[in-house]
Image: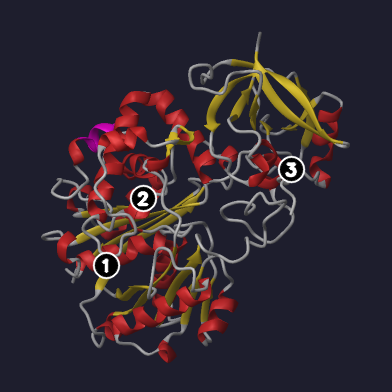
Amino acid sequence: MSARDIAIVGVAESDEIGKVPHKSALQHHCEAAWNALDDAGLDKREVDGLFTARYSPLTTGEYMGIRPRYSDGTWIGGGSFESHVMHAVAAIRANYCEVALITHGQTGRSARRPPLTDRFGVGHGNVFDSPDPNQPHLDYESPYGLVGAPVMYGLSCSRYMHEFGETRTREGLAEIAVATRAWAGLNPKALVREAMSVEEYHASRWIAWPFRQLDCCLVTDAGGAVVVTTVERARDCRKAPVWVLGAAESHDHGMISQMPDLTRLVAEETGPRALGSAGVKHADVDLAMLYDAFTYTPLLSLEALGFCKRGEAPDFVRGQRTGPGGSFPMNTNGGGLSYTHTGMYGIFLIIEAVRQLRVECEARQLSNCRIALVNGLGGLLSSASTLVLAAD
Amino acid sequence: MSSNPPPPPLPVPQPESERYWHGLRNREIWLRHCESCHDTYFYPRDICASCFSRDTSWRRSAGRGVLHAFVIVHRPPAPAFSSRVPYVAGLVQLEGSARIPTNLVDVPPDPGHVRIGMALEPVFEDVGPDTTLLKFRPVR
């Protein structure tokens, strides 16, 4: 797996991201695809592997005029895109396809009708809803108002605070909120860029205790796309390849009330598996892109992935360690917290990692970024999809 | 245009869960139990998710448990809950048994009054002509 034989050769967002009331979700998919293929210097007609979450690939394939010989609709939440990269690697190695296109587009903010799985105005059935009417979440959680990501993720955080201390956890969450916003200040595409003070964090209104407003990610409109191909094809692409050295995925539940242990992520397995297959140690990682649907999720992910021990993440992030100038750069695009978050954010983790590894990030560019770890999370802390990417 | 928000969704009993929902109507808590691995689990399914045995039965629970995790909801996550905030959503660990999603009632909805580990007892709340929900309150 640590062979440099499969590369990411194109990444892009859709034309406009943030508050975009004049573009549909499928337009975002298509613009991002166009931009990513342009980034790669590849023609759409060369795409023969199609990867889509939330929509069936039938719909994105139709919209973009793509007829793949490998089709993947893996949908395990916001980290589906990291899984798509893993699956693209497998499909390419098996000669089922050669040019894999992964796209995302969602109008989390501006959609013109509610999701079709909306029931009684409650909003979507679950963050990973499917159209079948047999939905345990709607029967066992929704009637109790156990609805929406802040409420459901908050359950896990309440347990973490109980086990490891409320005050120190709170301070760790504040560090992450402030540090991530500082990175957003350096990203022209971030939606919210004004510097955040710790005082401002602690004063933000309660959404669902233990989460304050500034613990929660944005809700935006955006698209993103990633193109994966062979080393041979990569040589003819426009930019330096970014190698996929390692990948791993897993999931152990769907809805939050079924999470086996509320403070343990399957990233405890996928992190070591991805790093191990890549032949990379934790100390080799120059950039961590960790899904931040909430300030809490990178905190938990740092422990699960093995960057620090269980319960130690609040100490690990102290002193703005993950922010600009800190010794452990994390979420350098400004994250789901301050850059963008449509409802499924994972593709943007990959895009930023690739840009850092290619030295394209200008004001927020890390010096000597050679290895990035990308950890997508999905569902209700349900799935983890971990990638290890390397600069050429 | 109606100014009344829609009500929260009612559960729809599936064939495999009818005994659970009808039990609540009778103020009884019936949970699935695996005769092979002895796990009492939630939510009801015919086949045990731990050991995949089909040898499963129904067992009645007294409903005593402790609070395992909670959230105090301030911003309604949907219009259906706008008249309910603030409310407490949580998970209850039933004694020797399963973990259940629920609401905490009869308790001030603030972190000073709600504690993980607090002892709870069941409250049966009729929310429709055929539907009863299982909620919990602190043991007095």
The type of residue carrying mark 1 is Val
- Of tags 3 and 2, the one toward the viewer is 3
The residue to which callout 2 is attached is A337
Q: Is residue A229 visible in the rendered structure shown here?
A: yes
Q: Position of residue B24 (x, y in %)?
A: 81, 29
Q: Position of residue B93 (x, y in %)?
A: 61, 25
* x 49%, y 22%: residue: B111
> Helix, strand or loop at disc 3?
loop
Question: Label 3 belongs to which residue?
Answer: B7
Q: Which region shows up in magenta?
A: A311-318
Predominant SS of the magenta segment = helix
* In this rendering, position of residue A332 left or right of residue B46: left
Q: A10 or A20, which is in the foreground?
A: A20
At 24% from the left and 45% from the top, the residue drawn is A179
Q: Residues within 10 Å of mark 3 (few under 14, many from 20)?
A: some
Q: Nearer the viewer, residue A63 or B65?
A: A63
Q: Circle 1 marks a residue in which chain?
A: A
Q: CA distance from mark 1 to mark 3?
A: 46 Å
Discs 1/3, front = 3
